[in-house]
Amino acid sequence: MRILSAVSFAVLLSLTVLAGSLAASSAASAQGAGLEQGLQKFTTDDFSDTSEGIGAVAASGNPRAADILGALQDGRLMFDAASKTVFIKTAAGAVVNAATGRPAMLPDSADNVRLNNRLRGALDAVMGTLTLLSPDPAKRLDAAQAVFKSRDPKTLPALGTALAREKNSRIRRVLQEARAAAILSSDGADDAAKVAAIAMIRDRGDQDSLALLQSLPKDSPANVREAASAAVARIGRSLEMWSLLQNAWYGLSLGSVLLLAAIGLAITFGVMGVINMAHGEMVMLGAYVTFVVQQVIRAYDPSLFGYSLIVAIPLAFVVTGAAGVLIERSIIRFLYGRPLETLLATWGLSLILQQLVRTIFGPTNKDVGNPSWMSGAFDLGGMTITYNRLWIIVFAMIVFVALLAMLRFIRLGLEMRAVTQNRAMAAAMGIRTARIDALTFGLGSGIAGIAGVALSQIDNVSPNLGQGYIIDSFLVVVFGGVGNLWGTLVGALTLGVANKFLEPFAGAVLGKIAILVFIILFIQKRPRGMFALKGRAVEA
Amino acid sequence: MLTQVSTVAKRPRTGRWLAAAAGLTMSLAATLPAKAADTIKVGILHSLSGTMAISETTLKDMMLMLIDEQNKKGGLLGKKLEPVVVDPASNWPLFAEKARELISKDHVAVVFGCWTSVSRKSVLPVFKELNSILFYPVQFEGEESERNVFYTGAAPNQQAIPAVDYLMSKDGGAVKRWVLEGTDYVYPRTTNKILEAYLKSKGVKDDDILINYTPFGFSDWQTEVSKIKTFGSAGKKTAVVSTINGDANVPFYKELGNQGIKATDIPVVAFSVGEEELAGLDTKPLVGHLAAWNYFESIKTPANAAFIKRWHAFIKNDKRTTNDPMEAHYIGFNMWVKAVEKVGSTDPNKVIAALPGIKVPNLTGGVSEMLPNHYITKPVYIGEVRGDGQFNVVWKTKGLVPGDEWSDYLPGSRDLKADWVTLKCGNYNTVTKKCGGQGS
């Protein structure tokens, strides 16, 4: 109870500070009038009126202001032009009158109050000021960030109040930065304060600070300008260093995607020697399994959505693995030793599979959602690391290690290696080579399927998904060395990193061409790739 | 000059006679000549398989709906319309083959089709040679005007330039720095060339323009997005003008969302992203990003509401969206019907002559007119992505904008003009006063 009253006092305080002396001395009726005037502006469906409305509601000092503007921010504020009334749809779906807060009926003619980017920016800043004293630290942090971006000198008093009360050191830091930003864009502040503010911003050191410092007016006093340009140079230098690391990270991430796409092929092409053009379609099938799993989860229990990928991984493996076994038994086994025919048959198969999926699911992209733990990003120093890429790197490594372990420690793995190295001998030892062929192809396809689960998170889920990866996959396997999983790993990561370091200089198109030329030259020199098999196995 | 005009007019006529003769022998050979006479055939040339199927299949369905509706109204000239659907499978040379098949084997009166510019370029010689009519429904780079083609999609001045104007305005954020991000092929390259010239004519400096191309189907946008972020931190308001095509858009927007670039910081205005493309995407992180089109499903007019209702009933799915190229086909089809009714024949020469000047209502409350350059007048809307995958119109042009076939901002095409009514020429040079001066 005490906390609650403290909070309401805090909100009230921030409002009064914002609205200045007028609101502080005014009676409740005057607050109501200001609010009412502001709300009227929302009913004309005109952006400049809405802008004035936001200002009026924020300045009214009315305790309902935060609710109203919050609803506007979330697109829950409705207006009815005929009766000139504004309504709030609460998050639970109920409708209340915005001015009174009492439950109301929403007329059919009601429509959303529309925003554009300019208003959205202004609204973020106003809401930031209103929620600086929120009891929720996450909200306070967001508010402080929003105020920092707004660089509005009018927020200075509210920032002062918030700083005086803030205990959390991280939020304090952002508040101080926000104050520095506001000081820099205010006309009244003296030079010493501005130079101190520049130092504050410089220590923040990210791209936002760079933007802020570079936007200082040209007519600032000399010492302020010098401090700013020194700070810009320093931030620029540190960002450049971070951008190297960032490139390496991007390369690692691209490499892991290539690895995932290629590792199944490393089995079917690398170990079995089957030129499998339908490999990409196995990836695509895996992605569609993810889609189906998500649809089922959405229909039956949306609360389990976060687990959808974990459910999809084994399912995709089973479905595509089974498809692989079926393909091997019905087509590939008749074509062993005839690479050209295998190539054509599997190419035809890939077209059939694409059109099959197109007929069943339709030609349009399917919406495969990212669970919350797969979306967003965090900052590591000057780097931005997105969660989906991070998890895909982790996932690719797990798949690689699991596959390696399987080939090494499990009986099936042993038999696979035996059949690849010497088929006749393996058969003589009592291994059913035909069965092993089918299982090996199934394993490669199944791994392609689970790669599809991962790729559904970063790419389109459409019938064309696989086509985009098939060439890259072959490049990786050939470059790394046919028949060697380690080669595939090193090949994928090398190509990924090289591509990402080329891209900033050469552009995406030229970068890709350069990589292709490099691989062609490399294959001239070492036709068997980086990690060539040696010894008698080569001849087999 | 005169002789030139007459040869232009004459050449197709011989073609027509040849085609008619070929048709006659064929219908004699076939044992069912009566059925062919009862219907007017309409060719639909959209990819139903391959990469472009994602966009083009919907247009095929839209055409089937329009033909179905026309038949329910009693057909055309007392005959039923009969759709002839072929699948060029996203394969550019196959487009030309299928177009030839439609015109000389099926004897269609008109063809509605193509999506990519390269597919249009591939069928052009066929339509010229066999003298038929093509309605092309997609926004494109302009720089072309052919006697046999009617362009119902937007030219750059009906989409790209108004979008840039909006971003430069106060409401659009008074943008000073521009990233022109596109897929590496003819449409983005030409559009970006026009935009670059336009921006420079507005006083934007070289340093403030970043042009970037990526390959088709690009999916790893990390570096590109962080490049945009860096470019945007120079202290001036920055916007991205995106001509990224098709599938590459989804991962691009996902990466923008993940790296935390909000529309309030760096807005992206796209020319190839419509309701259909957003359907495969969680749009929450994209709210506020922009698209420029001549039609949005969310525009509230009685005509549009009825259109959407009919579409949902036809396709038997309430979730299917409508989009700009669909409206273009709607306009094009109605224009063709009106022109045929006007001349009382489906003869290509008569219909081609009758089409300029035909006016039909569009779905957004205006009346679009076919111009002598074979482009149409269209309103331009800027829409912001909403949380539900639709667009909020935040800006529109005052009236309808006439399509400009040869851009005023490119050297070489500045002096060209197309007029099929008085000049009978697709590239008349206003300086040398000659037809067929500098072509595409």
Image (tube, rainbow, N blue to C red):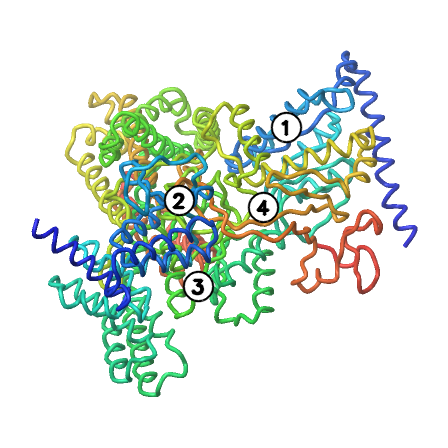
Q: Nearer the viewer, residue B139 or A56?
A: A56
Q: Residues within 10 Å of mark 3 (few under 14, many from 20)?
A: many
- Residue of label 3: B238
| Classed neighbour count for the residue bearing mark 4: other residues with Cα under 10 Å, few (<14), some (14–19), many (≥20) | many
At which x and y percent is residue B240?
46, 58
Q: Which residue is mark 1?
A: B66
Q: Answer left or right for A211 relative to B170.
A: left
As helix, strand or loop, the secondary structure at mark 4 comes to loop
Mark 2, Cα crowd under 10 Å, few <14 / some 14-19 / many 20+, is many
Looking at the figure, which quarter contains the C terminus of chain B?
bottom right
Q: Which residue is mark 2?
A: A85
Tell me if mark 1 has few (under 14), some (14-19) or many (20+) residues whose alpha carbon lies within 10 angstroms of its own. Answer: some
Amino acid at dot 4: Asn
Q: Is residue B125 visible?
A: yes
Label 2: chain letter: A
User: Which of pointers 1 and 2 indicates the residue nearer the eye?
Assistant: 2
